[in-house]
Amino acid sequence: MSHGRGKSDCCVIPGKLPNKAAGETPAAAEAVEGRRQAKGNAVAARMSRSSRREYDMGTALDGIRQTAKGRPGAKFTTLMHHIYAVDRLRAAYHALKRRAAAGVDGETWQSYGLDLEARLLDLCARLARGAYRPQPVRRVYIDKADGRKRPLGVPALEDKLVQPATVEVLNAIYEQDFVGFSYGFRPGKGAHNALDAVSVGIERRKVSWILDADISSSTTQSNTTG
């Protein structure tokens, strides 16, 4: 999907017509393959212009949701302009905890915000031309109630902006596939919602068994390759 009302991202998103499913408006479909590589000052100039034109984040994601729901198996080929939209990166910045620990870059919420708009535009341009590189995660350990230590990763500040921006866009696609009783790592859902569902199920339905399982160090030691 292009920016609001069918506007194309010059130098990044191709001007050709998007793929269109039956019954969809062009604004609800994603742009087709064929984007050209943007380079140098052209990207920075385009970012400066795009920062001044309206980008409706809600409308953009609604279009992605409609396509994902109406066209199961559809291939989304141009999502990056949604991720590096300055408004989305700015929202991610303001959602951060003000006193969160700094990563390997040493940047805090306060220090990054001293020249926020210029830095967001620079980040936006690097994402657009493929020059953005995630930084290593700083490992710290926090105390657990049983005396053990829990490993915690602290990303660099810009990674804290790009990651939630990416998750927000991808959620618009994958949330259409999840079943209602899936509660793990989903927006607006969590362990308390799962416990509420279990409680209601026990009270209103005939339940023969309940399985309580946990994977030790699932996020730090699991082999996810292959």
Image (cartoon, rainbow, N blue to C red):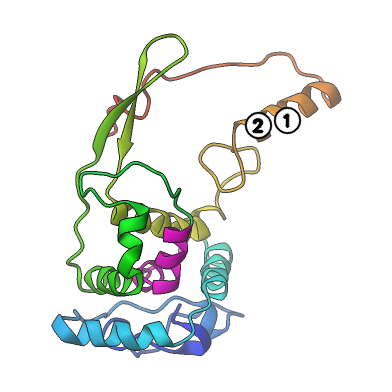
Residue drawn at (36%, 73%) of the image: 81
Residue 180: image quadrant is: top right
Camera-side residue of 23 and 186: 186
Vertical arrangement, residue 163 with respect to residue 193, above or below:
below
Residue 56 at what x, y percent from top left? 53, 77
Of residues 27 and 39, the one nearer the viewer is: 39
- Report the magenta residues as a range: 73-94
Q: Which numbered circle lies on residue 192? A: 2
Horizontal side of 60 relative to 18 (left or right) equals right
Q: Can residue 175 be seen in the rendering of this structure?
A: yes
| The label number, if any, that marks residue 196 in the structure image | 1
Q: Label 1 to label 2, Cα distance in Å?
A: 6 Å
Identity, as a three-letter code, of the amino acid under mark 1: Asp
| Spot occupied by residue 31 in the image (x, y as percentages of width and height) | 40, 79
155 relative to 163, above or below: above
Residue count near mark 1 (Cα–Cα under 10 Å), binned few <14, some 14–19, many ≥20: few
Q: Is residue 192 above or below residue 134?
A: above
Q: Does residue 159 show up magenta in the picture?
A: no
Residue drawn at (48%, 80%) of the image: 55
The image quarter in which residue 3 lies: bottom left
Identify the residue at image location x=44%, y=52%: 96
Residue found at the far right of this picture: 204
The answer to whether 214 appears left or right of 15 in the picture is right
Identity, as a three-letter code, of the amino acid under mark 2: His
Image location of residue 171, percent across then percent down: 49, 55
Q: Magenta span has 83?
A: yes
